[in-house]
Image (tube, grey):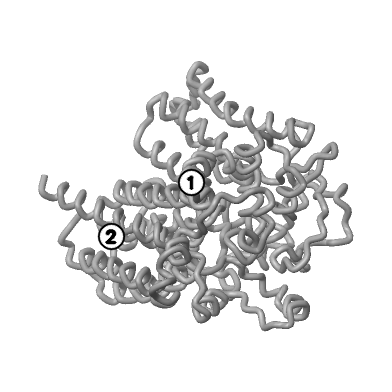
Amino acid sequence: MIRKLNNSILFSLILIISIIIMALSLKGISGNPSESDLNTIKWREHGVFELSPERGRFALTFSIVENNSIFFTEKIARFAAPDVGITNGKYVSLFAPGLSYIIIPGYILGRIFGSAQVGTFAIISLLALSNFVLIYLISRKITSNTVAALIAGIVFLFGTPAYVYGVNLYQHHVSTFLILLSIFILTRSRRILANLLVFFLCGLSVTIDYPNFFFMLPIGIATLIRLVNINISKNKIILKINFVKFLLILAVLVPISFLMIFQNISYGNPLRLSGSVKTAKFDIKNDLSSIKNVAVKDNDKSNAEKNVVGFFDTRNLLNGFYLHFISRDRGILTFTPIMFIGFVAIIYAYIKKIRHTTFFISILLLIILLYSLWGDPWGGWAFGSRYFVSAYALLSIFIAIILNKLKKNIYFIIFFAILLFYSISVNTIGAITTIANPPQVEILHLEKISGMIQRYSYDRGIEMLNVNNSKSFVFQEFASKYITAWNYYFIIVIPLLGVSTGLLFLLYKNTIR
């Protein structure tokens, strides 16, 4: 009883600290923008909506709530550009619509308090915190070690670019939440309702981001296998299938039906994906972040030639591996080297045949392979590899496993602490400054048209801190009157390093399990 109480107190304390840190880091400015306001500097590139993926998803939410329509007016379309399509003379979103609907409650609640954008972004922060909780629960189930599980959650939430995308408007935490929740359900229950919910989540994930179909595929297959009884005798294998239970898979069709209705209204065909829709063209000046990636986009191709399969190419594979793992503009080595311990932990878990290891590896490999084949492995302008947020979550679970194994090895703990401190320090910079880091391949072109030296790693955020600039809502609205941006950075990062140190000490002393 005392041990459970200690576990609950420790978890609650770490969760409260995490909530405070996320609130201090949340990106935003006060105000409820109108259509005309959206295209001002205050809200666009130099304001809160730095990049088109944020603008595009917010634009659909704005249009649904304010105009009761999934079609964009010209002003909204210009705000969302270049991720705007045109069908039958109407402007449409080129993103899967799920996220834009999920954040509607945050938009409405934020609007009531005069901060619609902040309320919208806060939904993503809540989901990021939910992912922290799920990683803790899954890790604790596997390792039976509360402290190792909490460290795994801290590593993911604050030691990777997941921190950065947890305070901005991107789909990655929603996708990660659906993956982790499905894993949590599968590892906890075999009941009919659990299977039904997992199938529903598989379908829902596709409405958030089309590539989620591949990442949820192992989860869907694992759920199907649970509905089959296999009896192996000497001469034959007998499969017993309960077709009534197999009907549970129809739960996938509920969110998929919503997606098809949206696509039919937007694109004129329920099976037409946004990647094949003609892109609307606008003359947008002084928008460096909208410059096309000259390394991955062929400007001579017409919109009529666009197709979804064309985004994947095996020739991209080696370059994709380099970019995601080693490069200075996106690589794990630069932004979150603590994740390499996760890869080492995979080897240990596989050798020791720890439960669910193969299952986790299958999802992880699909994420790595798909986004290494992707035509734009940089993820446009971004902080670190934003495509790997879900991969970071799975790797963090493996980190809990290796921490539990090596918790008494002081040299490992020290080495782990150094990597973690570096990773937290770097990603805190991105969380409170900017995610608008151009790919390295664009630098010469950008410097030519801007007449300025262009940074392409977390040093871009350091430049912002040097000029006393932060995009944190709390800093811009309140703290900037009293302290500098660097002071604000240390107010956030020092407690994170302190919490990490305390947890590693508890792990080493093994005082709480």
The answer to whether residue 377 of the structure is visible from this angle is: no
**What percent of the width, then of the height, locates residue 107?**
52, 44
In percent of the image, x 61 and y 56: which residue is there? 369
Q: Residue 214, relative to residue 240: is it above or below?
A: below
* Residues at marks 2 and 1 touching, judged by CB atoms closer than 8 Å: no
Q: Secondary structure at mark 2?
A: helix
Q: Which mark is residue 404?
A: 2
In percent of the image, x 56 and y 49: which residue is there? 32
Q: Residue 65, relative to residue 321: is it above or below?
A: above
Pointer 2 or 1: first along the chain:
1
The label nearer to you, 2 versus 1, is 1
**What percent of the width, then of the height, locates residue 72?**
73, 42
Q: Is residue 12 left or right of residue 52?
A: left
**What percent of the width, then of the height, locates residue 350?**
41, 55
Q: Secondary structure at mark 1?
A: helix
Q: Which mark is residue 110?
A: 1
**What percent of the width, then of the height, locates residue 355?**
37, 47
Looking at the rendering, in which quadrant would you find the C terminus? bottom left
**Front residue of this view, candidates 448 and 28:** 28
In percent of the image, x 33 and y 72: which residue is there? 494
Q: What amino acid type should be assigned to the residue bearing mark 2?
A: Asn
Q: How many marks?
A: 2
